[in-house]
Image: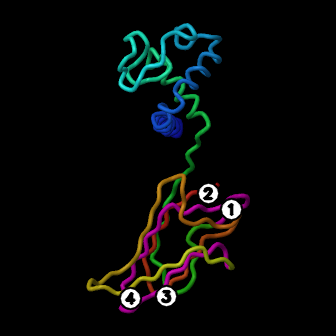
């Protein structure tokens, strides 16, 4: 599964940068294969304009710059890009917490905890604070829930990997301090 995700992320990254770096990637492929890429002699074809307009049909795939002549070349380039991408083990912890401070994710020596998303839900009738702590000394995030017209109130926030919302110091636990009974869910990874 990790290999599939790495390849998939590589394909996405490759598609995003292909227009900018396509000719350079083809050059690298030609260098790695001793002057030929996917059976095509180095230098074959001519750069194609977007959509292939103005480029001879044999110059490459429509819209692909640098004379790319097969999807095998694109796949080889994307595999080269994907080789350096490592997707971490993303996990979620969910707990019903009583008032006070609770360790939600245990720290590990040599690793930091990166929070990707969180959700905090409370049934309190008054505004209540929820604080996220790196260990016992550094507050890394704070939010306040306010009562609403419904029986529950809360907050949630998320970002997309590889970004994060907050990070704990090396080997420190992720602790959450709540004012009353609160349902908390945290999505994270360690590195």
Residue at the spot of label 2 = 190
Q: Between residue 183 and residue 148, name the one nearer to us.
A: 148
Sequence order check, earlier mark of 2 and 4: 4
Image coords of residue 122 (percent x, y): 39, 82
Sequence order check, earlier mark of 2 and 3: 3
Residue at the spot of label 4 = 124
Q: Give me the C-alpha separation between circle 1 and circle 4.
A: 33 Å
Q: Give me the C-alpha separation between circle 1 and circle 3.
A: 27 Å
Q: Disc 1 on helix, strand or loop?
A: loop
Image coords of residue 82 (percent x, y): 56, 34
**Figure quadrant of residue 84:** top right
Which of the two marks, 1 or 4, is nearer to us in this view?
A: 4
Mark 3 and 4 residues: CB-CB less than 8 Å, in contact? Answer: yes
Please rate how many residues cluster around mark 2, counting C-alpha atoms within 10 Å: few if below 14, some from 14 to 19, many from 20: some
Residue at the spot of label 1 = 108
Residue at the spot of label 3 = 179
Please rate how many residues cluster around mark 1, counting C-alpha atoms within 10 Å: few if below 14, some from 14 to 19, many from 20: some
Q: Between residue 41 and residue 190, name the one nearer to us.
A: 41
Q: Which residues are magenta?
A: 107-136
Mark 1 and 2 residues: CB-CB less than 8 Å, in contact? Answer: yes
**Figure quadrant of residue 21:** top right
> Which residue sits at x=69%, y=79%?
137
Question: Which numbered circle lies on residue 161?
Answer: none
> Which residue sits at x=50%, y=20%?
66
Q: Give me the C-alpha separation between circle 2 and circle 3.
A: 27 Å
Q: Give me the C-alpha separation between circle 1 and circle 2.
A: 8 Å
Residue 155 magenta-drawn? Answer: no
């Amino acid at each position: 599964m990790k290999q599939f995700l790495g390849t998939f992320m590589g394909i996405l990254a490759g598609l995003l940068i292909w227009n900018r770096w396509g000719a350079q990637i083809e050059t690298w492929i030609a260098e790695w294969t001793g002057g030929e890429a996917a059976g095509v002699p180095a230098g074959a074809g001519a750069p194609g304009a977007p959509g292939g307009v103005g480029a001879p049909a044999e110059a490459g795939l429509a819209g692909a710059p640098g004379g790319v002549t097969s999807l095998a070349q694109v796949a080889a380039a994307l595999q080269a890009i994907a080789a350096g991408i490592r997707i971490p083990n993303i996990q979620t912890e969910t707990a019903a917490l009583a008032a006070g401070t609770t360790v939600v994710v245990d720290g590990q020596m040599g690793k930091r905890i990166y929070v990707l998303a969180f959700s905090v839900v409370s049934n309190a009738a008054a505004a209540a604070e929820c604080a996220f702590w790196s260990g016992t000394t550094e507050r890394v995030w704070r939010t306040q829930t306010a009562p609403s017209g419904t029986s529950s109130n809360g907050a949630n926030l998320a970002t997309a990997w590889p970004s994060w919302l907050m990070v704990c110091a090396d080997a420190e636990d992720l602790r959450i301090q709540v004012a009353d009974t609160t349902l908390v869910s945290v999505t994270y990874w360690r590195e």
